[in-house]
Image (tube, grey):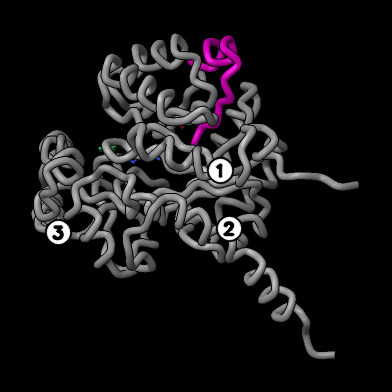
Amino acid sequence: MLVSNQICELLNIKYPIIQGGMAWVATAELASAVSNAGGLGLIGAGHMPPDALRKEIRRAKELTTKVFGVNVMLMSPFVKEVMQVVVDEKVQVVTTGAGNPGEYIPALKGIGARIIPVVASVALAKRLERTGVDALVAEGHESGGHVGEVSTMALVPQVVDAVSIPVIAAGGIADSRGVVAALALGAQGVQIGTRFVATTECLVHERYKQALVKAKERSTIVTGVSTGHPVRVLQNKLTKEYMERERSGATTEELDQMGAGKLRLAAQEGDVDYGSVMVGQIAGMIREVQSVEAVMQDLVSGIPGVMEHLQQATRFKA
Ligand code: TUI
């Protein structure tokens, strides 16, 4: 029997490639470009006030006729109003991050939205499957921004084994090898953030993109482990000061205060020294800024070559 990709079917998209819903980074321009290129674009609601999100959703509707979604950050002070905007605007796909979206599921189901929470553990994956969500993003420690503790390589197959809904792998994926590897682990799709930051359609400050292009595999660090808000960012003057303050016993409030507003500072103002430059560990692989279409074509066109490598590398000695 010929079966097709479950994520393409579920979301009505050509390729099972979802662009991460990055706060301050994933605007209507980026999301619509990814959807127009055959993937699923997401607007990152982050800490956006509800009216700003409504404008962004309406702009995406002007820029694409394809399906797109919104990522709702559950730690946002506006989360309730933001969910109401998503419902009012009948957004077709909603992903959630940094928490448990349980209480919003009935309202989202009511408008027929596909609900895809991001999880960083098997326990939450199992709990959310029972609430009727459509799929899950299993996001590993390699990712940029707010991260869990388990690596993508270890998390994805364990989540795949624990649930029967489709799983999308995230964290450390930026080329065709990563895409095929994720599918080999049992995922039905991938979510890619960092590589989509290095695109012409991404409206972050040019210095943010250049810092990403210059980064190596060890350029990032996870701050905020002690405060319960672990966030992966590029190492810079801000992280150096933060780590010093953390070591010398600063309180959680003082440390959280230090991080407040710093993603906006980096993304909009381009302050890559004192701002939070959120990128994943795969940043070291990204060497240039390209169009979204070029990135998508590179991700997809490289797949046959990776499959050939797998064929050859799995023919063992007789
Ligand atoms: O959410 C993300 N990544 C993010 S959100 C973000 S916005 C921000 N801005 C400034 C400071 C801090 C954050 C930047 N990056 N990824 C999805 C994700 N969700 N990763 C991990 C989780 C997660 C963690 C714990 C999901 C659920 C969870 O458990 C909650 C529970 O109730 O069990």
The residue at which mark 2 appears reads as: 300
Measure the C-alpha gap from mark 1 to mark 2: 10 Å
- Name the residue located 36 percent from the left edge and 55 percent from the top edge: 280
For disc 3, the neighbor class at 10 Å (few under 14, some 14 to 19, many from 20) is: some
User: Can you tell which mark lies on residue 233?
Assistant: none
- Name the residue located 82 percent from the left edge and 45 percent from the top edge: 3
Q: Mark 2 vs mark 3: which is more N-terminal? A: 3
Q: What stretch is highlighted in magenta?
A: 104-118
Secondary structure under the numbered disc 1 in the rendered image: loop
**Tag 1–tag 2 contact (CB < 8 Å):** yes
- Name the residue located 31 percent from the left edge and 36 percent from the top edge: 23
For this orientation, the residue located farthest to the right is: 1
Type of amino acid under label 1? Gly
Q: Does the magenta stretch include residue 106?
A: yes
Q: Position of residue 139 (x, y in %)?
A: 48, 46
Would the CB of label 3 be found within 8 Å of ligand 1? no
